[in-house]
Image (cartoon, rainbow, N blue to C red):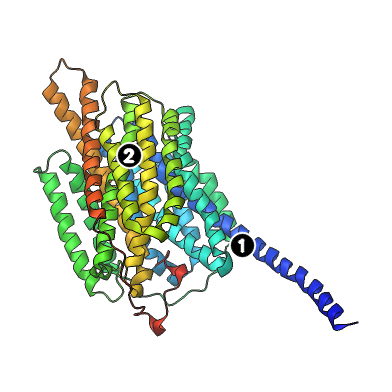
């Protein structure tokens, strides 16, 4: 046999083995990836289904909006409390064990929510849900990074992104169908079979992760942060009624003192719960403040829109879900486009354009009346979704790019936890403001006026406040600049942080 024939024969023999290796790699990744996706989709769906059910919860428990909004505020505050602990917990006990525990805790909390008998019970059980759900996403994403070969991480993370994009679109529709056709209890109880499936898949297919030497746990920071943020959210909620009443002043005072103590403690810790030293970067500070402004207005408005559609326009929960779907779809369309443009033109023009169209849509909504057509509202929420898709991704990327390289691995838990805190403030503040404005308009209109007119005027004022907040963001977006190049340093051996850990630490 000639050398050429031998070479061809060897090539034929090696090709099947390479293909088999590729097939084996894919087969090995899919089962644990499925376990992670099933677990994460519960949390992602739960973040979208409750907003649509709030009017039904207010009626069922015969309470007010200010009380029920704490089902959102308490949940998001619980998320923010445990997100920074994900890295320490996985190092101390192993990623697989903690992931399974969080699924179990979230599932138990869901079932308890489904059988809640009072608003106070529902709020407490939502906090339990949040304690379980907060660590699921960062641990799950970190596990995917470790499971996927480097050359396939992009495609594997793309698979993980599918439920993240679909859940906001179909969550309100699923919630509406369950609320209208079955019962509100099932928006929570449906997590029981999903959680059991995720537990079985995870126990069977997730690889056992080696434990590592856990860093020092910042216990003082862990205690101060929930006190600070929950009391500030309470103060903001009460401030919607009156900024001078005792409950408002107490909440803001206690929360403010706890926040100052938290900042002091974190800056002195070698391994803080949240890495606040990144704020020494002016580019990072400008970017994250702008992100908070946008999130405050957008998430608050997205809580108010379902309330208006059901409470004023009389649509069912299912109809509301279908009406809200285009907003999520438009957001999903805007994200990949803005991702490509970001590399070419940077964050400033995208943030400016996205926030401008959002502010225009909110100003239009602020002029709503009893006779406003649905075909005015739908284009507005579509524009808001598109603007959100164009603005949020570039802003988040800009924040990561502007952080000092030595602290990059510590930025993700800070930004993720802060987002949940801002969402809680948005829910507490705007619902409190809405309630007070409706009461104010009703009192000034007199007994003979149409009560619906006072309600609509209150919603208009709330949309106007959101529009003003976003307009502030438009002005702040002009201050963005391309982050300066910074030397990589501060890590052991001068190495860059492991990307797999960015989601978990």
Mark 1 secondary-structure assignment = helix
In which quadrant of the rendered view does residue 81 lie?
A: bottom left
Q: Residue furthest toward the right?
A: 1
- Which residue does the numbered mark 2 point to in the structure image? 303
Separation of residues labelled 1 and 2 (CA atoms) = 37 Å
Q: Quadrant where the N terminus lies?
A: bottom right
At 76% from the left and 70% from the top, the residue drawn is 15
In which quadrant of the rendered view does residue 213 lie?
A: bottom left
Q: Position of residue 193 (x, y in %)?
A: 54, 45
Q: Residue furthest toward the front?
A: 344
Mark 2 secondary-structure assignment = helix
The answer to whether the residues at label 1 and label 2 have Cβ atoms under 8 Å apart is no
At 22% from the left and 57% from the top, the residue drawn is 228
Residue density around tag 2, few if under 14, some if 14–19, many if 20 or more, within 10 Å: many
**Is 159 placed left or right of 13 in the picture?**
left
- Which residue does the numbered mark 1 point to in the structure image? 29
Ranked by sequence position, the earlier of labels 1 and 2 is 1
**Which label sits on residue 471?**
none
How many marks do you count on the picture?
Answer: 2
At 34% from the left and 47% from the top, the residue drawn is 354
């Amino acid at each position: 046999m000639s050398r050429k024939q031998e070479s061809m024969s060897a090539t034929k023999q090696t090709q099947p083995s390479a293909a088999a290796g590729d097939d084996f790699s894919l087969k090995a990744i899919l089962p644990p990836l499925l376990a992670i996706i099933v677990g994460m989709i519960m949390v992602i769906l739960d973040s979208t289904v409750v907003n649509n059910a709030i009017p039904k919860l207010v009626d069922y428990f015969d309470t007010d909006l200010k009380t029920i909004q704490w089902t959102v505020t308490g949940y998001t505050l619980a998320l923010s409390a445990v997100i920074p602990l994900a890295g320490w917990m996985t190092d101390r006990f192993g990623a697989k064990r903690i992931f399974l525990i969080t699924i179990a805790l979230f599932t138990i909390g869901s079932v308890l929510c489904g059988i809640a008998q009072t608003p106070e019970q529902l709020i407490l059980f939502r906090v339990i849900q949040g304690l379980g759900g907060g660590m699921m996403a960062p641990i799950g994403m970190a596990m995917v990074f470790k499971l996927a070969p480097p050359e396939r991480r992009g495609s594997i993370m793309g698979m993980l992104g599918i439920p993240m994009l679909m859940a906001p679109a179909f969550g309100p529709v699923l919630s509406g169908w369950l609320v209208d056709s079955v019962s509100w209890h099932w928006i929570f109880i449906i997590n029981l079979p999903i959680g059991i499936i995720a537990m079985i898949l995870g126990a069977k297919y997730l690889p056992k992760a080696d434990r590592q030497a856990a860093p020092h746990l910042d216990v003082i920071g862990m205690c101060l942060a929930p006190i600070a943020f929950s009391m500030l959210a309470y103060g903001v909620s009460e401030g919607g009624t009156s900024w001078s009443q005792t409950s408002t002043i107490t909440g803001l005072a206690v929360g403010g003192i706890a926040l100052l103590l938290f900042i002091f403690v974190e800056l002195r810790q070698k391994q803080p719960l949240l890495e606040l030293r990144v704020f020494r970067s002016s580019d990072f500070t400008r970017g994250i403040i702008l992100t908070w402004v946008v999130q405050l207005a957008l998430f608050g408005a997205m809580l108010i829109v379902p309330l208006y559609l059901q409470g004023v326009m009389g649509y069912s929960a299912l109809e509301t879900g279908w009406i809200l779907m285009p907003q999520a779809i438009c957001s999903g369309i805007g994200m990949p486009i803005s991702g490509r443009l970001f590399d070419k033109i940077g964050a400033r023009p995208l943030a400016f354009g996205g926030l401008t169209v959002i502010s225009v849509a909110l100003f239009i909504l602020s002029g709503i009346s009893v006779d406003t057509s649905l075909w005015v509202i739908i284009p507005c929420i579509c524009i808001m979704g598109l603007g959100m898709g164009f603005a949020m991704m570039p802003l988040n990327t800009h924040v990561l790019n502007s952080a000092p390289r030595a602290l990059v691995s510590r930025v993700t838990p800070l930004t993720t936890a802060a987002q949940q805190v801002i969402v809680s403030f948005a829910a507490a503040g705007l619902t409190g403001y809405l309630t007070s404005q409706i009461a104010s308009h009703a009192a000034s209109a007199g007994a003979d006026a149409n009560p619906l007119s006072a309600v609509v005027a209150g919603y208009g004022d709330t949309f106007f406040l959101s529009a003003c907040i976003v307009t502030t963001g438009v002005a702040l977006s002009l201050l963005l600049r391309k982050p300066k190049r910074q030397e990589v340093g501060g890590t052991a051996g001068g190495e860059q942080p492991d990307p797999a850990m960015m989601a978990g630490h």
